[in-house]
Amino acid sequence: MIRLDHVGLHYGSGKRPGPPILHDISFTIPQGGFRWLRGPSGAGKSSLMSLLNLAIRPSSGRMTVLGEEIDRLERRDLPPLRRRIGMVFQDFRLLSHLSVFDNIALPLRLAGLPEPELRENVDEMLAWVDLARKATRRPVELSGGEQQRVAIARAVVGRPRLLLADEPTGNLDDMQALRQIRLLGELNRLGTTVVVATHNDALVARHPGPSLRLEDGRLVADE
């Protein structure tokens, strides 16, 4: 599913590249696996998630995602592959002018799914995250935990094979955080590969699982 071999990342290009962000990262995650991505703020977790989400490419090394060697792909090959990856952001990134239903439906509309099939899929997601009664609300009318559930539903409505969650509980209280982690765990048990970035060691202790740990852009533990 995911394999990184001696991957490095720096921003900038040409003869004056920026300082290195990630150094010599190597690990594998099998299909259907789960990994916590741990480390303090500034350790490089978000940069690694951006690599896995194909938003950026590595500066060195080799990376395989969903069975595809990324350095061998043309730019035009990336969007279809990226549509098989779901991404959940800490700041939700919901569109304020759209309803809950339309926020969740957005990836399916962009993919051109017929409206009857789209509605069936979105209704299923609304029921799964227990927000069917708030389908017509705008994000500003929801609590932080509800907004995060909308973000999760939007990320998985297209049935991605890989789900990435970058600090998905950072703005939530303990009860809401546990609810989000249970949703992600359900997806993993159904066969979705899940990577969750967090600096919350207490949360990891309550939901133990395999972990990758970064410090100063280096992988210091794979356990």
Image: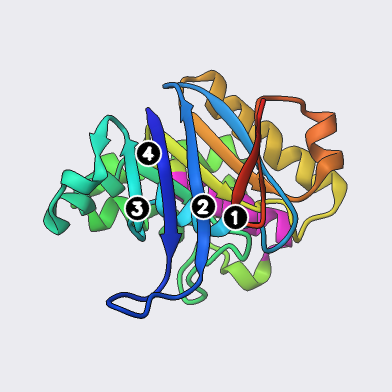
SS under mark 3 = strand
Residue identifier under label 2: 23
SS under mark 2 = strand
Marks 4/1: CA distance? 39 Å
Residue at image x 37%, y 27%?
A: 1
The picture places residue 65, in percent across and down from the top left corner, at 33, 37
Q: Nearer the viewer, residue 218 or 75?
A: 218
- In magenta stretch: residue 151: yes
Task: Give whichever of discs 4 and 1 has the lower sequence position.
Answer: 4
Which numbered tag is attached to residue 121? Answer: 4
Residue identifier under label 1: 217
Q: Is residue 82 left or right of residue 28?
A: left
- The residue mark sitting in front, 4 or 1, is 1
Task: Give whichever of discs 2 and 1 has the lower sequence position.
Answer: 2
- The residue mark sitting in front, 4 or 2, is 2
Residue identifier under label 3: 60
Where are the magenta residues, as a range? Answer: 142-155
Choose top left, top right, bottom left or bottom right for residue 143.
bottom right
Marks 4/2: CA distance? 41 Å
Task: Give whichever of discs 4 and 2 has the lower sequence position.
Answer: 2
